[in-house]
Image (spheres, rainbow, N blue to C red):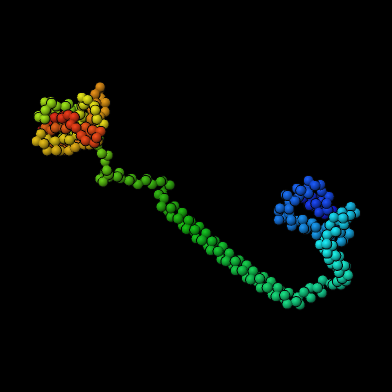
């Protein structure tokens, strides 16, 4: 250390703290902020060591030297460290300078050492292995390049042969042969789109008695797929309904549950769809019952109707 021990602002503050050159406020700051960090404590010890070396080596400026003697040197620990530094400095100063040797003498002396001989042998082995590996890699690369060139030549010869074959197949005069006519695909096995189902809608009025319908029977063509039954309500008082279709003799044909009433032309209608095949020619009754809030059911109305199939 020569002239000044400060390297940066933090070092300058720590050196001032060691030599008692800082104010009371700065001293408090160093003790509260810096000396709580392990790295700051290590740096403070290193700077104290550098101050001792500079003091022993007479490298401190006069004012810093006086501060060192007034603040640090009274400490017994610092005095022991200063004395030890002086002894080391005197020992180093009393050692004779080593004689100068020619570089080849030094190299020969180095080679005679066992450790040096082992290191040289290791280097020879490493360089030999590297040379063998490089030779193997180069030989592999050459073989791979020869294989690629051979495949490229085979592909070029094959392409040339195909070109000659195509030229021999051309008709005389350079005419292009007509393309082959592909027969249209057969319709066999091709699924045709399904036809729209035929639906017949019947509007039914509630009857007074469970008997023969008073209205004319509905004529349902043989091609009809579904029958849409619409039951008109006089009063709508239920959230859902159950419809049961049965014959006049009381045999149940089918039933639908969970039906809802929809408004239509100032009244309400309950609608559902049945397969036309389930209603052959004959007379039927539709019993409509409504679900009560308690979970039970009550009859609402009976709808008689008849179905007639046209003769062929």
Count of marks, rendered view = 0
At a point 37% along the width and 45% down the height, the residue shown is 178
In the picture, measured across the screen, residue 268 lies left or right of residue 46, that is: left
Give residue 305's quadrant in the image. Answer: top left
Picture layout, residue 73 above or below residue 192 = below
Q: Toward the viewer: 130 or 296?
A: 296
Give residue 213's quadrant in the image. Answer: top left
In the picture, measured across the screen, residue 271 lies left or right of residue 131, that is: left
Q: Toward the viewer: 240 or 229?
A: 240
Q: Position of residue 302 (x, y in %)?
A: 15, 30
At a point 20% along the width and 27% down the height, the residue shown is 232
At a point 82% along the width and 71% down the height, the residue shown is 103
Q: Residue furthest right?
A: 62
At a point 21% along the width and 32% down the height, the residue shown is 290
Q: Position of residue 2 (x, y in %)?
A: 85, 56
Q: Residue furthest top?
A: 266
Res. 297 visible in picture: yes
Q: Toward the viewer: 16 or 150?
A: 16
Q: Toward the viewer: 190 or 31?
A: 31
Picture layout, residue 33 above or below residue 198 = below
């Amino acid at each position: 250390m020569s002239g000044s021990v400060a390297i940066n602002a933090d070092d300058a503050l720590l050196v001032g703290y060691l030599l008692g050159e800082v104010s009371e406020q700065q001293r408090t700051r160093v003790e509260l902020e810096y000396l709580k960090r392990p790295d700051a404590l290590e740096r403070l010890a290193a700077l104290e060591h550098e101050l001792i070396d500079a003091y022993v080596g007479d490298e401190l400026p006069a004012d810093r030297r006086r501060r060192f003697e007034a603040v640090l040197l009274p400490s017994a620990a610092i005095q022991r460290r200063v004395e030890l530094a002086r002894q080391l400095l005197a020992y180093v100063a009393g050692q004779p300078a080593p004689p100068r040797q020619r570089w080849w003498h030094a190299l020969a002396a180095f080679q005679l050492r066992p450790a040096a001989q082992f290191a040289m042998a290791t280097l020879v082995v490493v360089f030999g292995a590297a040379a063998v590996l490089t030779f193997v890699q180069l030989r592999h690369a050459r073989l791979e390049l020869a294989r690629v060139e051979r495949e490229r030549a085979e592909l070029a010869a094959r392409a040339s042969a195909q070109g000659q074959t195509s030229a021999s197949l051309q008709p005389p005069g350079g005419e292009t042969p007509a393309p082959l006519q592909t027969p249209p695909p057969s319709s066999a096995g091709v699924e045709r789109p399904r036809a729209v189902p035929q639906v017949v809608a019947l509007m039914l009025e509630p009857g007074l008695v469970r008997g023969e319908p008073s209205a004319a029977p509905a004529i349902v063509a043989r091609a009809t797929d579904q029958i849409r039954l619409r039951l008109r309500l006089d009063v709508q008082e239920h959230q859902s309904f159950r419809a049961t279709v049965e014959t006049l003799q009381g045999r149940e044909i089918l039933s639908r549950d969970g039906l809802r009433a929809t408004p239509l032309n100032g009244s309400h209608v309950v609608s559902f769809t049945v397969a036309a095949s389930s209603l052959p020619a004959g007379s039927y009754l539709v019993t409509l019952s409504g679900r009560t809030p308690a979970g039970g059911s009550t009859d609402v109305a009976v709808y008689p109707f008849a179905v007639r199939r046209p003769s062929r």
